[in-house]
Amino acid sequence: MTTHDRQPLGRDYQLMVSALADVTRRRDADLDDAERAYQDSATRAAGELARAEGEALAADRWAGAAAAQVLDVDREAARLWDQLRRARGLRVRALGELPDPAPVEAMPRVALQRRPEPGEDVVPAGRQSPRVLLSRAADRIDVTVRPAGAAVPRWALPLLPLTGALGAFITGLVAAGLVTFGDNADWGGFLIRGFGWLTFLAAPSAGVPVAAYLVHSRLRARMDIGGIGLTLLGGMLAATLLSLSFAATR
């Protein structure tokens, strides 16, 4: 066999070696890509797992806070209900026992399934907190149901005649306006003047309801006979002065 006959075999061998090198490079590149894809997938999976664990922990904390709030609201509602039952009057005594809360099956499923965002209140948007509602109920019980037993403070006694005088002054001005308007009215003047003079008669005691309301709502006290007398005294003095002034101008 001559040298010329061995040359094609050498070229074929070189081509085979070159092809094998290309295949090896492609294999290494594919292995590198697969390794990078595996590492990326593992990193994303680890991140998703960490985020899921964080969300589960936040949901557990929110559920614990919601359960504690439910217990507090139930205790406060039971206390207010018992306080309302012990109040005076037959109507409130017939309330009976504290009603059972609404079953969870009756609650909206959307509100039960959604986890609130960080910093969001347990109460759904658009609804007031149970603590706020119970606080309003407690204030109403204190103001409208529970009787005020304390006497009017001494520092407030001088204000009662001033309240009576202010009420009598305003009522007297209204009465004077009615009488004056009745004098100049073309029809119904007699009735308007009569209503004005009746308003003059009621002027001395016009400040008593106002003073009683302020004492009861602001001072949590009761309006005794002494406070009523002081208020009437201021009202009578103011009404007398206003009546004399009005009579002098006619």
Image (cartoon, grey):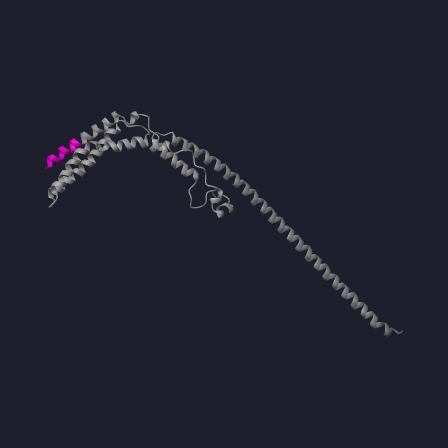
Question: Quadrant location of residue 11?
Answer: bottom right
Query: Which residue occupies the foreground of this view, 166 or 25?
Result: 166
The quarter of the image holding the N terminus is: bottom right
On screen, residue 232 versus residue 35, left or right, reads left
Query: Which residue occupies the foreground of this view, 227 or 242?
Result: 227
Query: Which residue occupies the foreground of this view, 12 or 92?
Result: 92
Identify whether 142 is placed above or below 177: above
Magenta span covers which residues? Answer: 239-250
Question: Quadrant location of residue 60?
Answer: top right
Taking the view exactly as shown, the residue that stands out farthest to the right is: 1
Looking at the image, how many numbered discs can be counted on the residues? 0
**What residue sits 60% from the left and 49% below the top?**
48
Query: Which residue occupies the foreground of this view, 68 or 47?
Result: 68
Residue 76 pos. (x, y %): 44, 34
Question: Quadrant location of residue 245?
Answer: top left
**What residue sits 13% from the left and 41% below the top?**
191
Magenta segment, prevailing SS (helix, strand or loop):
helix
On screen, residue 94 versus residue 226, left or right, reads right
Magenta region includes residue 206: no
Residue 174 pos. (x, y %): 18, 39
The quarter of the image holding the C terminus is: top left
Identify whether 219 is placed above or below 21: above
Identify whether 228 is placed above or below 65: above
**What residue sits 79% from the left and 67% below the top?**
16
On screen, residue 16 versus residue 202, left or right, reads right
**What residue sits 11% from the left and 43% below the top?**
184
Residue 81 pos. (x, y %): 41, 33
Magenta region includes residue 245: yes
Residue 158 pos. (x, y %): 26, 27
